[in-house]
Image (spheres, grey):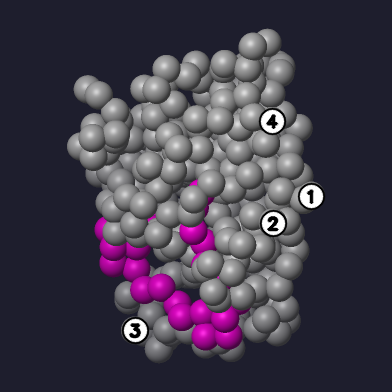
């Protein structure tokens, strides 16, 4: 079974979001609405957060698979959801439009301060995993074209068909950022696919280079070559739950509950979990999340 996540999911979720019309779902602040973006890792993390809260007796509404970064962020600041997993580098570049930097702790400090000041949002602890943006190609294409860096890709851009997700073209950490850092270039073709079918299109030969994330299980599963970001566009992308301040005020135990899982989420672990969903097993993200939490003694069977 292949998991495909697309913008249509947002339309299907609108009635549920209307019902959960208050920031906490019900009037007494006891229900917490957990959101996520529209790719496997976000669904796994969203399920982890939801199941951890439920195991501690908190009522949870799920609004998973919302869409891209902007959709999830707007849902959070509008109060349609109370929390969702976000990445420090995404917050720095795509939301705050700040300059890139390489120090993970400094990126975390800045996004935490800016989110609190601008949006009344709280970043909980960041995980050690780094799901950095990247570009990758097949080993065959890399060896045939001596292609190992993004600078080399830019030199042959007119021969490159690049496959990416819908919001990549305009994001400061996407194609727009690549052109700012690496100079203007013109691709043979820029192809947009929903996250669930991006790799399928690449493997079918529709593209030469594909946008990837550092913890994608497909990188190892398909023996892809990640191109070196030799001009340093991309900052660290450590994940953390981002929570509405008023949700934390109503449910202060959320922080301790969710922070407990964060140190366990290494890049290696997350890559393996992602591959369980997107690889040949095609497992349900909720089951993968549950098994991980049980194995680590964070919830009861």
Q: What label sits on residue 118 in the rendered view?
A: 1
Q: Judge from the rendering whether residue 117 lies leftward or rightward of residue 50; answer left or right.
A: right
Query: Of tags 3 and 4, which is closer to the observer?
Result: 4
Q: Residues within 10 Å of mark 2 (few under 14, many from 20)?
A: some
Query: Of tags 1 and 4, which is closer to the observer?
Result: 4
Q: Is residue 72 visible?
A: yes
Query: Of tags 1 and 3, which is closer to the observer?
Result: 1
Among the two numbered marks 1 and 3 on one chain, the one whose residue lies closer to the N terminus: 1
Task: Label 1: state its secondary structure.
Answer: helix
Is residue 89 in the magenta section?
no
Asked if disc 3 and disc 2 are in contact, CB closer than 8 Å, the reply is no
How far, Cα to Cα, is label 3 from label 2? 44 Å
The location of residue 177, given as percent across then percent down, is 68, 71
Quadrant for the N terminus, please: top left
How far, Cα to Cα, is label 1 from label 4? 14 Å
Among the two numbered marks 4 and 2 on one chain, the one whose residue lies closer to the N terminus: 2
Residue plotted at (71% across, 73% down) = 99
Q: Which stretch appears magenta?
A: 215-240
How far, Cα to Cα, is label 4 from label 2? 16 Å
- Residue of label 4: 246
Among the two numbered marks 1 and 2 on one chain, the one whose residue lies closer to the N terminus: 2
Residue plotted at (57% across, 81% down) = 232
- Residue of label 3: 143
Among the two numbered marks 3 and 4 on one chain, the one whose residue lies closer to the N terminus: 3
Compared to residue 274, the image places residue 139 above or below, namely: below
Asked if disc 1 and disc 4 are in contact, CB closer than 8 Å, the reply is no
Q: What label sits on residue 93 in the rendered view?
A: none
Which of the 4 image quarters holds residue 72?
Answer: top right
């Amino acid at each position: 079974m292949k998991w495909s996540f697309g913008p249509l999911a947002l339309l299907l979720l609108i009635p549920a979001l209307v019902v959960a019309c208050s920031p906490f779902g019900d009037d007494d602040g006891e229900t917490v609405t957990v959101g996520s973006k529209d790719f496997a890792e976000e669904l796994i993390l969203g399920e982890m957060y939801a199941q951890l809260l439920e195991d501690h007796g908190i009522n949870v509404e799920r609004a998973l698979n919302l869409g891209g970064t902007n959709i999830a962020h707007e849902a959070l600041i509008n109060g349609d959801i109370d929390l969702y997993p976000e990445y420090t580098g995404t917050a720095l570049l795509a939301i705050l439009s700040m300059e890139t930097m390489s120090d993970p702790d400094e990126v975390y400090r800045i996004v935490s301060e800016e989110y609190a000041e601008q949006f009344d949002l709280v970043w909980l602890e960041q995980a050690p995993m780094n799901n950095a943006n990247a570009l990758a190609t097949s080993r065959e294409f890399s060896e045939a074209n001596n292609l190992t860096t993004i600078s080399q890709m830019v030199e042959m851009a007119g021969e490159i068909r690049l496959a990416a997700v819908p919001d990549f073209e305009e994001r400061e950490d996407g194609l727009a950022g690549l052109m700012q850092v690496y100079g203007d270039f013109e691709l043979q073709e820029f192809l947009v696919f929903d996250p669930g079918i991006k790799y399928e299109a690449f493997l079918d030969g529709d593209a030469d280079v594909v946008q990837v994330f550092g913890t994608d299980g497909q990188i190892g599963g398909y023996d892809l070559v990640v191109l070196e970001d030799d001009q340093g566009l991309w900052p660290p992308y450590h994940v953390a739950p981002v929570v509405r301040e008023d949700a934390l005020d109503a449910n202060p135990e959320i922080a301790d509950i969710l922070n407990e899982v964060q140190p366990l989420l290494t890049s290696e672990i997350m890559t393996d979990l992602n591959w369980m969903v997107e690889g040949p097993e095609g497992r349900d993200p909720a089951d993968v999340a549950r098994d991980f939490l049980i194995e680590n003694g964070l919830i009861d069977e």
